[in-house]
Amino acid sequence: MSVKDLVTETSRFSTKSGHASRVHYKVAGLAMLLAMITYLDRACIATLAPNIMHDLSLTKGQMSWVYSIFAFSYALFGIPTAWWADRIGTRRILTRIVVWWSVFTMATALAVNLVSLLAIRFLFGAGEAGAWPAVARTFFRWIPRKKRGAVQGSFFAGAHIASGLAPLLVLALVQVVNWRVVFIFFGSLGCGWALIWHRWFRDDPASHPEVNAMELEHITAGQASENERYGGWKFWRQLLSQRNVLLLCCMYFPNSFAFYFCITWLPTYLKECHGFTAMSLGFFAGLPLVLSVAGDLFGGFTTDAVARRFGLRIGRSLVGVGAYLIAGVGMIFAAETRNPVLAGYLIALAVAASMFVLGTAWATCIDIGGDNAGVVSAVMNTSGQIGAVISPLMVTGLLDLFGSWNASLFVMGGLFLIGATCWCFIDPRKRVFE
């Protein structure tokens, strides 16, 4: 069905005032709430780790496996779930995803030993896999092209806000309830979201009763024709051999690598390498996450503004190159300096600069993926998850090999510079399936 036919079909929804409805903002708001819930469920286990380890008699090494098995299953099932979302729509798939992960979030309260906890967290990761690519597919259908970077940036800002608030909320809750109850509480939040989503959302804006003709025309303006291709050897060969996709995967690897360094080893690095204690340690360990929220928001709005002024290629690629150059140079200088405070600020700046790219990267997946935006973004996200799995292991490996924490910072800086080079050759105007 053409855009003209869609507009004609939905003309009965036009408002008397002649103004466009704003349902796509509600969709974006629900997606941002979803991002917050995903990070609440992910982050709570880290804060509750001491309680869990005490009750289940786990060592630090065993707890590390609990963390890693989530990232492994999340990466393993991300692409198949996103492919499914592209094929049948995100109303049903996101409902299934959120209900699944919420159930296994609550099921974490039933763990009695290491084996049961590993099984539950594996299934938790498998359930949550594909959530963010499915959101990208939703944005392709619902968000006007000129707003996609800003909406993606706001989505990631929600996730990082939640990651910063989660420890405070968890610590407050454990003062009054057992750690098992905390998992049940967080799991119930996702179930509530899934109920609202399934009852209210529609895969196609044209079929939503609150969308009028003016908003539908606004949403579909500038969209390329649909390119529905959902499987077969030719589909996967074309997807995995397309230059843009390969470059996005290479570019995204250092992003997750550095972020997982921040949420795993950064506090230890600051303490052992620079001697931070108490208040200063807490400040500089949290600063990258705080600045990441600003990076998410400003990065998304910047890529859209530059794209409107200079075109899509410059709006996406130039922003990516600039931000990654700052991230790479910042990490390298942080490794070089002997000033602890300067090192802390440079690491925070580098991480925030890398988060500046998130809106750009995911908007590019939508640009080149079209109706297959879910699976394209899932391929990119899977490469990031590989970085997340490798990051904690490589940090300790480099520490053993070179006897210096700063070896990891040099590696991250180099990876960001490679990512900046990748952005030079990414062309968001060239779709994967044409």
Image (cartoon, rainbow, N blue to C red):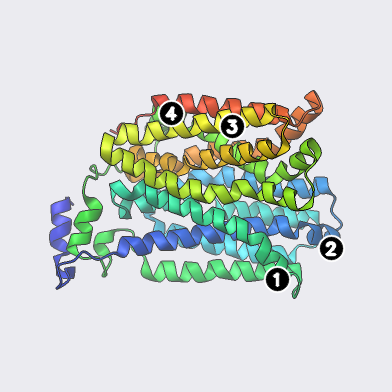
Q: Label 3 to label 2, Cα distance in Å?
A: 41 Å
Q: Is residue 245 above or below residue 224?
A: above
- Name the mark nearer the viewer: 3 or 2: 3
Amino acid type of the residue that numbered disc 4 sits on in the rendered structure:
Trp
Label 3: which residue?
330
Mark sitting earlier along the chain (1/4): 1
Q: Is residue 311 above or below residue 95?
A: above
SS for dot 2: helix
- Name the mark nearer the viewer: 3 or 4: 3
Q: Is residue 296 above or below residue 328?
A: below
Quadrant location of residue 367? Answer: top left
What is the number of the mark on residue 55? Answer: 2
Mark sitting earlier along the chain (3/4): 3
Residue at 66% x, 43% y: name it: 262
Mark sitting earlier along the chain (2/1): 2
Amino acid type of the residue that numbered disc 3 sits on in the rendered structure:
Gly
Label 1: which residue?
173
Query: Is residue 385 shown left or right of residue 7?
Result: right
SS for dot 4: helix
Label 4: which residue?
423
Residue 400 in view here:
yes
Q: Position of residue 5 (x, y in %)?
A: 14, 55
Q: Label 1 to label 4, Cα distance in Å?
A: 43 Å
Amino acid type of the residue that numbered disc 1 sits on in the rendered structure:
Leu
Residue at 55% x, 61% y: name it: 37
Mark sitting earlier along the chain (1/3): 1
